[in-house]
Amino acid sequence: MAHPLIEHAERTLAETGFRVQRVAGTPQLPGDQLLISIASDPQGRDRLILLTLYEGLADEIDDAHLLQYFVRMPFEVATEQRDELARFLNLVNVRLPLGAYGFLFNGMVFFRAMAMLTVDTSTWTKLVSEYLFITVFALDAFAEGVEAVATGRMTALEASEADPRLDPLDE
């Protein structure tokens, strides 16, 4: 049986119209997770958000739950583009209300947001949905620019100048 918060999120998001699939936990990350399908990106690629509850923190935070919204982007950053992408992500991440884009040494680019929910179940519906909408906003608003820089189609300077929401980089 899944944690009550995961069950609640599954039910609430499905009722809202999202395709939701429960994913069984693993030894490295026990507890069920949710895979949420959202609208495809402009190139027609599927977009999935993995919702994970970090139950292991209950020993240190006894009156709240930590819920992660994680999106692995459908592209990677080339080794020679890491510095450019890091510069660009600094500009993007300060414009986001919650969450941040990042990348790993192996090239994986991701978006991640963390929600802290109280044990008061009456707050769960609104918070679970709002964090999902914030994650979708971050993807809709900035993923194309992030991909352009990660793949070398644009420099961080070019991408910052092309997006009026961002402060342009100094050369």
Image (cartoon, grey):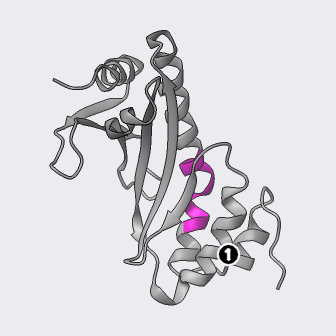
Query: Left of 21 or right of it: where is 64?
Result: right
* Residue drawn at the location 79% of the way across and 71% of the way down: 161
Image quarter hosting the N terminus = top left
State the image coordinates of residue 157 (x, y, percent, origin top left). Answer: 74, 78
Reply above or below: 130 against 81: above
Q: Position of residue 54 (x, y in %)?
A: 36, 39
Magenta part of the chain: 138-146
Vertical placement of residue 3 versus 70, above or below:
above
Question: For this view, does 60 lie left or right of residue 143?
Answer: left
In the visual, does 30 lie left or right of 96?
left
Note whether 157 is above or below 29 in the view shown: below
Numbered label tally: 1
From where the camera sits, is residue 163 visible?
Answer: yes
Q: Which residue is mark 1?
A: 87
Residue furthest to the top in view is 122
Q: Is residue 164 highlighted in magenta? A: no
Which amino acid does the dot numbered 1 rest on? Answer: Arg
